[in-house]
Image: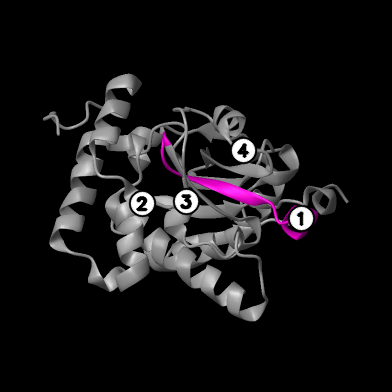
Amino acid sequence: MRSLTPFPSSSLNLRLLEEVLYDLPPLEGIFLHWHTHGVTATTAGMSSLLARRKQLLGPTTLSGASIQLLYECATDILHRQVVQEPHSLWDSRPLHARLLRHGPSLSAAETQALLPPEVLVHKTISIKLAETLLLCTGVGPQRLTRQHLRAIAAALALPRRTINPVTYHSVETFAMQPGMVSPFLHPSRHTGLGALVLLSWPEPREAQEQEVAISLSLWESLVLPLRCLRQLICSYARQAYPGVRVIELESEETLYA
């Protein structure tokens, strides 16, 4: 494995970082170990590998703690859904069989173009509304509209004149590069996050068995059933940052009405 100094935050050399990633043992091995023995069987070597991965890839990847907690939450939700109602073998496949590798992307639109058909990108943006730092998360190409902002301001009891959002710098605040901004924050990292906003998506997409790709790095995504996403985000948030308010917005059609 090549030896590198910790990730320089001032610039990105995506080609070099991709070579570093492919020098590291793949996440499939760690996920398979967790699938076989449980997350509590994480070895010191695996923890060291996840820490080394974050050290080398910096804000282009989720932290090891985030990946481990995300795995726990997703596995639990998938298991409960399979028990409650039968699904095909494809829908029931374990997480180590749900990892997808692709070219690097620095935006949700770029990632969407790299994904297979019927797989939607998981999109998150960071903004500041008045003095409140927010993460707004949803799927696909949808944008944050004035109707969304009014609903968020109302939920936070903010004056309507404060609904002009300011884009926030994700690297300094969340240790996440643009294209990696995510609600799956490091469980012990203080970010000053004021609220997490779940944007709605059409329910027929869930009924049509569509899937969603959650970025683990700029080059790796975890593909899950779309019907799991809302539960997954809420479950992760409760454990990683329990003091942060989670706001679930209604559909945009309802907001307009």
Q: Residue at x 14, y 29 (%)?
A: 2
Residue 43 x, y percent position in the rendering: 18, 64
Residue type, numbered disc 1: Gln
Q: Which numbered circle lies on residue 116?
A: 4
Q: Is residue 87 left or right of residue 41?
A: right
- Is 168 located above or below residue 12 in the figure? below
- Tag 3: Cα neighbours inside 10 Å, few (<14), some, or many (≥20)? many
Q: Amino acid at mark 3?
A: Pro
Viewer-side label of 1, 2: 2
Q: Assess whether residue 169 is covered by the magenta stretch.
A: no
Residue 88 sits in quarter: bottom right
Q: Are marks 1 and 4 in contact (CB under 8 Å)?
A: no
Residue 208 is a magenta residue: yes
Real-space Cα distance between discs 3 and 4? 23 Å
Which residue is depicted at the point 80% across and 55% down? 204
- Number of callouts: 4
In the rendered view of the protein, which quadrant contains the N terminus? top left
Where is residue 81 drawn, in percent x and y?
60, 73
Residue 28: image tag:
2
The Cα atoms of the two marked residues, 2 and 3, are separated by 22 Å
Q: Give the alpha-carbon distance from disc 3 to disc 1, as whole Å.
A: 25 Å
Q: Amino acid at mark 2?
A: Glu
Q: How is the image coloured?
A: one colour
Label 1 Cα neighbours within 10 Å, binned few <14 / some 14-19 / many ≥20: few
Residue 33 horizontal side relative to residue 179, left or right: left
Residue topped by disc 1: 208
Disc 1 from disc 2: Cα separation? 27 Å
